[in-house]
Amino acid sequence: MPRQYAKLLALATVFSSSLLAQGLNTQASKDDWEEINFEFGSAVLSDGYPSLLRLADLLQKNTGYHVKVEGNTDNIGSERSNEKLGLARANTVRDFLVKYGANAGQIDVTTRGKRDPKYPGYKNRYSHTDVPRWMNRRVVLTVTDQNGKTVSDGGVGQAIQAIAPAPPQNPPCCDDILKRLDQITALLNDMKNQNADLRRQLDDVKNQQAALENKVNNLPKPLTEAQTSQVVDARLEKARDPRFSLLGLNIGADDRKNVTFTGSGRFFAPFKEHFAVQIQGEYLYFRNQKEGQGDIGLVNRIGRFQGGLFASFKNVDLSNGDVGQFQGIPGYSSTTPNSGLGHGNGTLGQGALVLDYIFSRGKVGLFGTKAFLDNATLNTANYTFQDASGNTVIAPNIFLQQYLHVVDQIGVQGTVGLWGNSYLEANIGYLKSVAHADRPGGTVRFVFPFRSRLAFTVEGGVNETLLRAGNSGRAVVGVEFGNLLRPKEFASVDHPIPMQVPRVRYEVAVRRIQRGVSPPVADAGPDQLGIPAGNVTLNGTGSHDPNGEALTYQWIQEGGPTAAISNANQATASFTAAAGQGYTFRLTVRNTDGQTASARTRVTTTSAPQVNILYFIANPTSINAGQTSQLTWSVQN
């Protein structure tokens, strides 16, 4: 018989151990009180009402006690918003206690925000089943007695136990006697019922063994390879980072009433919680220009702030360019044969920094750009000018070069939710021009979703790409389709969101360049032979430069009697010539490139005629007063 009891006791021990192993044991007691926790982002009480009612009653009865309520949040969100939320939760608990009997002077409130998480193991992003984050959204109650001594620092259950009066105690002697009597009674009852209990336990063990065998026999078969793959694929798909893609098509008219078309696409891929890659492209069609732009960049989000750095490339085709827009540029003429200006193709590049602040209805931010691939040459044509005679001359070494120049910009942009799911995207920037006046430019787009992946758009812009002498604009309508976030959802996700990348804005400029040099042409004027003596003019105004460069002049005497030259460094000089003399002068001209040329001219003057007396006869040769004499003579010249 003792051996049978021993076997039954062993079986009972095994059975009770198995029950403990199955989690049927608990550390809770009937005196435990429910703690206070909150839903995500909320300061509304959702549990713990009995605990708070009991605490309010104890504070009402014990006016000397004080409670400090400290609100806590989980780890999601900014420091500032969590501080505010923690204080709101503490105020909610205080208002409840005051409403149900506590004195407002007994309660102080403060906030710890997200600085003091008590329970580890929480995730860094929102999950409805994240228990540690639920337990961290709590209040801590610090109780001090009438002497200011802290008697409790924890949850509401500890606060109640600290304030509740201790149960009355019996005299020590009676307690000891009663306790011993209870022990004797329990021992007798145990011994009396031991046999019956062991028999029942043995029957239970047999029944459980049979039930266990049935369960083992009825267990489902292991998953097949295909089923296992399906489960793994489903779990991987659930854990994969989200991907977003968007396509857009627009058609409308520009400010010249010509048809314009736009097609765009964007791919956005978050990774590693705080990062994302954004790749996008756009094609713009105008009557006189075609543009294609590609952008790639990295986005980083921290709380409600995110920043992105992008590299953008744009190819511009002006093969059908409007040459009229280049009229008025010095040296350019639309009638110049094969001038080529107004046509060509070039590629530009710029870097862009974009910063966003995310709030409940969308985001706002700043952007700035700087070119790293600039001044793409479109075409080159010879420089033309009019000479002194009014003739059009083509310069052999000077050219007009048309090129594309990137316009640097800085501005603001934003995406804001409107009514329903509709929202507004807008940007405006200051454009720094080198060919024209500085000006603003921007785009406004209204998006009206009518399906989960379809939206109708209305868009308008001013100075969106090419800057001209005057402002330009366009207005278009279109559709967008793809999976995308609405602005009202931006704040609720913890990964980055797509950013607005500035378009590459540019202008067409013309510069004058020189390739090689050419010497000037010197012209000292025709020879002046057999002219009268006196003031003589030297005329070098026929000198010129084939490239239209400015000339300097220098007259030097090379032959003849020395003569003083007036205005020797001017195109027209003069000197005084003596009779019967010959002179030689050299004119040297120099252009701005340092090239020189020389020419000579000769000047000769006639002598004054001399009178030659052939004979002179007086008959008579001598006479007195009143007498006459006959004179006869002959001269030459």
Image: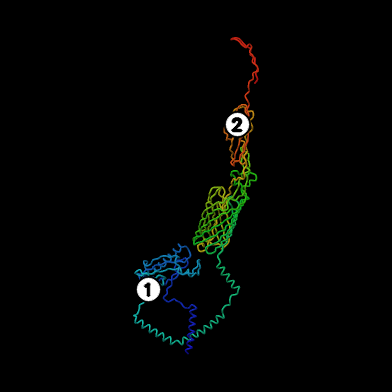
- What x and y, as percent, mark residue 40? 47, 67
| Residue 111 position by quadrant | bottom left
Q: State whether residue 101 appears in this view.
A: no
Image vertical order of residue 175 relative to residue 301, above or below? below
At horizontal 64% and vertical 15% (from top left) the residue drawn is: 616
Residue corresponding to mark 2: 537
Q: Nearer the viewer, residue 325 or 424?
A: 325
Residue corresponding to mark 1: 164
- What x and y, as percent, mark residue 39? 47, 68
* Amino acid type for the residue under numbered disc 1: Ala
Whether residue 426 sits left or right of residue 290 in the image: it is left
Position of the C terminus, as image quadrant, is top right
Query: Mark 1 and mark 2: span between their CA atoms?
Result: 128 Å
Image vertical order of residue 169 relative to residue 83, above or below? below
Q: Nearer the viewer, residue 376 or 506?
A: 376
* Amino acid type for the residue under numbered disc 2: Thr
Whether residue 169 sits left or right of residue 577 in the image: it is left
Whether residue 30 sits left or right of residue 225 in the image: it is left
Q: Nearer the viewer, residue 406 or 438?
A: 406
Instruction: Tell me which numbered mark, 1 or 2, is placed earlier along the sequence.
Output: 1
Q: Nearer the viewer, residue 456 or 169?
A: 169
